[in-house]
Amino acid sequence: MPYMLEQYDNLEPTRWSWWKKVFSKDECQRIIDIGEAVGMVQSKVGGGEDGELDLKQRNSYQSWLDWNEELDWIYKALAERIEDHNKRFFGFHLNGFKEAIQVTKYTEGCFYNWHQDSGATNRFRKLTMVINLSSPEDYEGGELELFGGDGGIMSKELGNMVMFPSYEQHRARKVTKGTRYSLVAWIHGPRLV
């Protein structure tokens, strides 16, 4: 994968950061169309594509977008924001993208209960970033929520990104109406001690 990231002195990481309008409305729709064309499959838990089906923990659909020249514009936009936010807010040692990015689809009744993106099967994930690809008027519910502290409900605005350490507990609340799409990426680095 391209886009190896520069290293920074270690800061005391913040809980989360955000960036407005990473992608335009047309770009968000283009990403949704690419994800749908690749093919949506039932989401799994605990290990990406090799995880297990657990509909009590997670009920959603996803597709995986491996880096290629046609998708370079997505990876490049993400890498630029990651580098900036890591320098200003997190200070992690990062290696870059080591797995495909994910387009996730939450239809009515879909959710993802409280979880962390790093752990026994994903211990090298350092930062998680989530970009809302749907307009807020396209769905109800489905909010991204960080657990406790200064976390809370993240913005539902189209094209906005939230980034947080992958060890932070978070969830996607149940969609009660419509369909929510998001783009999810994980940035890897040396294992946290």
Image: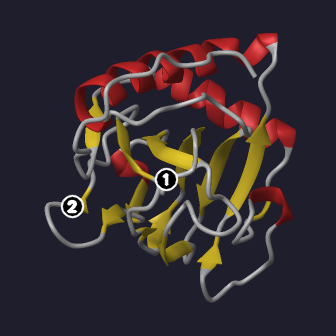
Element type where label 2 sits in the image: loop
Question: Dot 1, how many residues are within 10 Å of its Cα: few (below 14), some (14-19), or many (20+)?
Answer: few
Question: Dot 2, how many residues are within 10 Å of its Cα: few (below 14), some (14-19), or many (20+)?
Answer: some
Residue farthest toward the front in the current orientation of the protein:
193
Residue drawn at point x = 74 percent, y = 69 percent: 44
Which mark identifies residue 192?
Answer: 1
How far, Cα to Cα, is label 2 from label 1? 21 Å
Element type where label 1 sits in the image: loop
**In the image, residue 63 above or below residue 79:** below
**Which quarter of the rendered picture does the N terminus lie within?**
top right
**In the image, residue 130 above or below residue 45:** above
Instruction: Name the spot of residue 174 as percent of width and height, x first.
Output: 46, 75
Instruction: Choose mark 2 or mark 1, whichever is in front.
Output: 1
Which mark identifies residue 151?
Answer: 2
In the rendered picture of this protein, how many numbered marks are placed on residues?
2
Amino acid marked by disc 2: Gly
Mark 2 and 1 residues: CB-CB less than 8 Å, in contact?
A: no
Residue farthest toward the bottom in the current orientation of the protein:
56
